[in-house]
Amino acid sequence: MSDQAKGLLITVLGVFFIVPDSLFIRLIELPPIEIAFWRNLLAGLLLLVFILLRRRTMPWDALRAAGGYGVYYMLALGLAGVLFTLAVSMTSVANVVFIIASMPVFAAVFSRVFLGEPISRRMIFTMLCVFVGLAIILRGSGETEGASIQGDMVALFLSAVFASALTAVRKVRGTSVVPLVPLAYIFSAIVLWPFVAPLTLGMDQAGLVILHGGFIAISSVGLALGPRYITSAEVALLILLESVLAPLLVWAWLGEDPGPYALIGGAVVIAALALSNAVVLMRRR
C-alpha cells in the first residue's frame, strides 16, 4: 500500500470515529460536565497506553521539549473537549459542527497576528464566505428548535480556542505534540473531578460512556497518524466530512432537524472551505 493510500485510509478512519461524538453526547443521560469528564478521562487514558506501548517514551518528555507553547496547546486542547460537550448540550449539533468548521479562518487570523504570516487573497475570499455562512447560522438560532445563540457562541469560542492551539504548536514544528493529547485530556478531567460524582455512574450509562471514550481515542490516533502521509489540504478536506455526516447521523437517529438556516449557512461554510482546500491541493499537484 502506498503512503498516499495509507494516509487517506487512516485519516478517513479517524474522521468516521469522530462523527458519532455529538450523538454520544445526546444519548448519554448525564450532565454535560460529567460527560466531558468521562469523555476526556477515558480517551486520555487509552491514548496514554497507546503512546507508551508504541513509543516507549514518556509524554511529559514531549511537553518539556515543546516548552510554553506545548503547555498552551495542552491546556487549549483540554478546554476544547469540554467546550464541545457544552456547545452540543446547548444548541443543535448542526450549528456546532458547522461553526467549528470555521476554525481555519481563526487559524489564518492568529497566524497573521502572532506569526506574521500574510493572508492570501484566496484565504480572504474564503473568510468572507465563511462569515456569511456563520451569519446565516446565527440568524436562524432564534427560530430553529433546539438551537440557541448562547450555544452558538460557545461553539464559536471553541473554534477560536482550537485554532489558537494549532497556531501555538507551529512555533515548535520540530517537536511532535501527539504525546500531549492524552495529557491534555487527562489534565482537563482532573480539573473537572471536583464538580462531578464519578462513583455514581450507573451501569445503564457505563456502556455508552466507555464506548464514547473509545471512539474519541481511536479518532485521535487516526487524525494524528494520517497527516504524516498526506498533505494538510487533503486532511482538511477529509475532516470536512465530519461537519457533513455528524448532523445527518443525529438527524437520522434522533430526528433532530437542523433547520433551513443551519443547512444553508453550513453549506456556504463547507463549500467555501472545500473549494479553498481543493485549490491548494491542485496547486501543489
Image: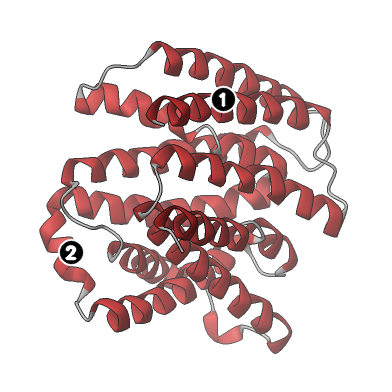
Residue located 65% across and 83% down the image: 206
Relative to the observer, which residue lies in front, 88 or 211?
Answer: 211
Amino acid type of the residue that numbered disc 1 sits on in the rendered structure:
Leu
Relative to the observer, which residue lies in front, 169 or 189?
Answer: 169
Query: Crowdedness of circle 1 by 10 Å Cα count: few (<14), some, many (20+)?
Result: some
Residue located 59% across and 35% down the image: 99
Q: For the residues marked 1 and 2, what is the alpha-carbon distance in whole angstroms?
A: 35 Å
For the rendered model, the colour scheme is secondary structure
Image quarter of residue 178: bottom left
Q: Where does label 1 land, which residue?
A: 275
Q: From this view, report whether residue 198 is shown above or below residue 105.
A: below
Relative to the observer, which residue lies in front, 158 or 190?
Answer: 158
Q: From this view, report whether residue 17 is shown above or below residue 107.
A: below
Please tell me whether mark 1 or mark 2 is closer to you in this view.
1
Name the outermost residue toward the right.
255
Percent x, y for residue 263? Answer: 77, 31
Percent x, y for residue 115? Answer: 20, 28
Percent x, y for residue 126? Answer: 51, 19
Query: Crowdedness of circle 2 by 10 Å Cα count: few (<14), some, many (20+)?
Result: some
Amino acid type of the residue that numbered disc 2 sits on in the rendered structure:
Ala
Q: Where does label 2 land, which residue?
A: 62
